[in-house]
Amino acid sequence: MKPYDLVAKTIRGQNPGRTPVYGWVYENLKNQIKEAYGSIENFEDHYEFDMAHIFGGPYPFDMKAIDGLREKGNEITPEVLLDIPLKPVDRMEDYADIITALAHHRKQRDRFCYMQTPGIFECLNGPFGIEDHLCHLALYPEELKIVYERQAHWNAKFAENALELGIDMVHVSDDWGAQRSLLFSVDMWWEMIYPYHKIISDAVKARNGFLSLHSDGCILSVLDGIADLGYDVVHPWQESAGMSYDAYLEKFSDRFGILGGLCIQTTLGFGDYARLEAEIRRVFQLLKNKRWMFCTTHFVQDHCSTEELAFAFDLAVKLARG
């Protein structure tokens, strides 16, 4: 079965007995992997990755203007940010890298391609700063709703453009979780986050695209809302933040798939090969043949050797395809 078909069937709950394999390996280990394999692309081909996580495209904020205001002593409040127009989302020259990546991964290797796009909370931590942003949620909720709605429509257009170019799944990155709970209250999530994600999700679903969410940390308390929004995949389902696989299998496995399984916070990169092997085998035993795609929970960190990375993926490929 070709990689795209395997992933699409797995997301739909029709896994044919082979687990899709992928990994976020390039951000911190580029030089090490290049030395060992010649390039990141060679590493991906060596393990015949079934997916490709594509980055690029336009950026919404004029950070020079924002930084200039800060340098003059101005606080970046929602009202201040609204006076700074978002950058264009329809300049197709900004999508050149995406077109190149699709030619490599989708046309030449038939991989399932998903595109990183902004969420609502995480992307606005850039202009606000996360501490001030959390304060704005409490101090300026009505003004912030206007900021969020503007951002959601920009994000939706970005997603539509990516789908039109041939992206298979829009991957919305929006970190909401701390190690044991959300960064804000559940009620605040429903009031301040859900409505603006719905603008994005409705746009993707109207074009029959797959939709996935990345959020680090514990997001158990809003999983019903995530499912209601129509997310097809959640990444990473972070066990190390209190999200047990039992909770997924008991309540959510018929509502969305999960991407993850190899924890970079607790498992990969610590030189404990026996524990690494035991953890990979345990997760496969729990999730194989389910709506699950094997992947790292985030970018592999630079304390992980290429030898340990190869050990992990040698085993994962064996279990996935055996």
Image: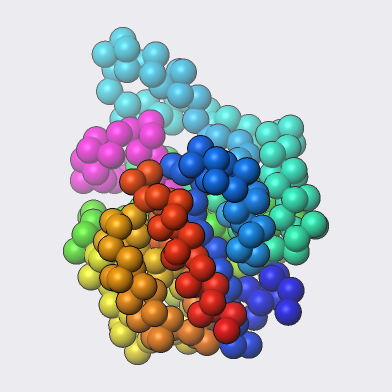
| Residue 194 in sight here | no
The N terminus is located in which quarter? bottom right
What's the residue at 75%, 60% (across, down)? Answer: 109
In percent of width and height, residue 303 lies at 33, 46
Q: In which quarter of the image is the C terminus?
A: bottom right
Residue 220 to residue 149: above or below: below
User: Residue 57 occupies which quadrant of the picture?
Assistant: top right
State the extent of the magenta-drawn residues as a range. 119-143
- Relative depth, front residue between 307 and 19: 307
Residue 233 vs 287, above or below: the answer is: above
Identify the residue shown where x is 68% and y is 34%. Answer: 94
Left-right relation of 9 to 252: right
Please tell me which residue is depicted at 44% across the width and 65% down the height of the picture.
312
**Residue, far top:** 72
Q: Nearer the viewer, residue 64 or 32?
A: 32
Q: Which of the two residues, 221 or 15, is positioned nearer the viewer here?
A: 15
Determine the image quadrant of residue 186. Answer: bottom left
- Residue 290: x percent and y percent? 50, 85
Left or right, 69 with reference to 178? right
Residue 244 seen in the figure? yes
Find residue 276 and report its horizontal and vertical position in percent: 33, 68
